Image (cartoon, rainbow, N blue to C red):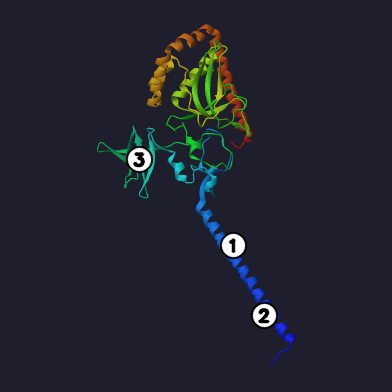
């Protein structure tokens, strides 16, 4: 049947509209396919360039011990982080492995297998685990020797802010090891820096009126006791080994007996990178003999102290002893007064602390 021109024109317009719609829809679909492909390629590229890193969840100061609860793991672009950033917690764990003699325990990966080695006197000894007991041992001269691990804390080398990415160069092993003779001591007769904070590392020094200045104990992490949530002004806690406790007590006696002397505290500026200073204070001969016979002092500490006394006995005889003798009875009276004041201060601080508990003790 013939159609008139108007019908033909309407049909052609309809077909043209369908064609245009199909072309536009095809273009949109093609655009979306290209966009989806680009998105997938970008996502794959991001995944290929992504790495897991450990970041700090809080601020830390140089020398502060870093524990796992201070860390959170994040995923970021590997091009935006240092190549030595730490992403595997096992790397942190390797930093804290030593045996009781201080020999380092290292891990080596070969053929997708990790093996522990003990590094001793320039040699490596493979450590094996005993199936029956779970204990580790090494074989030396065809003899089985058991190895006891000891944990050494990881510390920050420098001050770091929250969200800092941890790298190998930012952390180190602590100098402090937990030994059987380690005790927490409280001292309230020291001259403290005005801005001393818990967690900082300190030296305790003895200054004489003649100008001589001696390091009594070095690089100790300080904790400031609190009463009612407020730091005590004149007291600190430090962890001390038996030999350090005895030496410190001797230094306190010398400081009290020598008029014009003082025991004071100095802080480390970057405790994480600075080595401990070498103590230069020489205890009295009586104390040296006590240290030599004290069964609670580990052998290495005893030998170091005896050597220090023997090498520097002239310092004691030429400087400290004459200063003490020159004060005579005045020095002894000052000693008695200062000891009594120290005891009184300790009792008052203890009473304030118990009062702050509200009687629930």
Q: How crowded is mark 2: few (under 14 residues within 10 Å), some or many (20 or more)?
A: few
Task: Work out which quarter of the rendered image holds the C terminus and state it.
Answer: top right
Q: How crowded is mark 3: few (under 14 residues within 10 Å), some or many (20 or more)?
A: some
- Mark 2 or mark 3, which is nearer to you? 2
> x%, y% of residue 82?
52, 42
> x%, y% of residue 278?
46, 22
- Mark 1 or mark 2, which is nearer to you? 2
Q: Residue at x 56, y 60 (%)?
A: 38
> x%, y% of residue 228?
63, 34
- Checking the image for residue 15, the label placed there is 2
Q: Who is closer to the viewer here, 134 or 213?
A: 213
- Checking the image for residue 117, the label placed there is 3
Q: In which quarter of the image is residue 152?
A: top left
Q: In this view, does 334 lie above or below 85?
A: above
Q: Please report contact status of discs 1 and 2: CB closer than 8 Å, yes or no.
A: no
- Checking the image for residue 35, the label placed there is 1
């Amino acid at each position: 049947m013939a159609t008139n021109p108007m019908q033909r024109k309407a049909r052609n317009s309809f077909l043209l509209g369908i064609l245009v719609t199909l072309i536009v829809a095809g273009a949109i679909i093609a655009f979306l396919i290209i966009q989806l492909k680009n998105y997938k390629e970008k996502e794959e590229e991001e995944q290929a360039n992504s790495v897991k890193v450990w970041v700090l969840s809080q601020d830390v100061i140089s020398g502060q011990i870093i524990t796992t609860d201070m860390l959170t793991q994040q995923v970021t672009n590997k091009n935006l982080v240092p190549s030595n950033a730490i992403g595997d917690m096992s790397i942190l764990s390797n930093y804290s492995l030593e045996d009781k003699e201080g020999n380092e325990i290292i891990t080596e990966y070969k053929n997708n297998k990790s093996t522990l080695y003990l590094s001793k006197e320039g040699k490596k000894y493979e450590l094996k685990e005993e199936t029956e007991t779970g204990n580790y041992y090494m074989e030396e001269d065809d003899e089985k020797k058991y190895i006891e691990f000891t944990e050494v804390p990881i510390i920050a080398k420098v001050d770091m802010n929250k969200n800092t990415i941890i790298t190998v160069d930012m952390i180190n092993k602590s100098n402090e090891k937990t030994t059987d003779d380690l005790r927490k001591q409280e001292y309230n007769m020291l001259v403290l820096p005005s801005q001393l904070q818990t967690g900082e590392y300190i030296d305790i020094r003895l200054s004489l009126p003649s100008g001589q200045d001696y390091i009594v104990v070095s690089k100790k992490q300080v904790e400031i006791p609190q009463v009612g949530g407020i730091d005590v002004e004149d007291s600190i806690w430090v962890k001390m080994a038996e030999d350090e406790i005895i030496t410190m007590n001797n230094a306190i006696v010398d400081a009290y007996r020598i008029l014009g002397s003082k025991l004071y505290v100095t802080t480390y500026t970057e405790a994480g990178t600075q080595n401990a200073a070498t103590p230069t204070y020489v205890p009295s001969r009586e104390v040296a003999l006590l240290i030599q016979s004290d069964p609670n002092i580990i052998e290495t500490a005893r030998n170091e102290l005896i050597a220090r006394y023997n090498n520097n006995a002239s310092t004691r005889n030429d400087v400290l002893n004459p200063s003490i003798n020159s004060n005579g009875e005045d020095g002894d009276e000052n000693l008695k007064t200062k000891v009594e004041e120290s005891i009184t201060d300790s009792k008052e601080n203890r009473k304030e602390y118990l009062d702050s508990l509200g009687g629930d003790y």
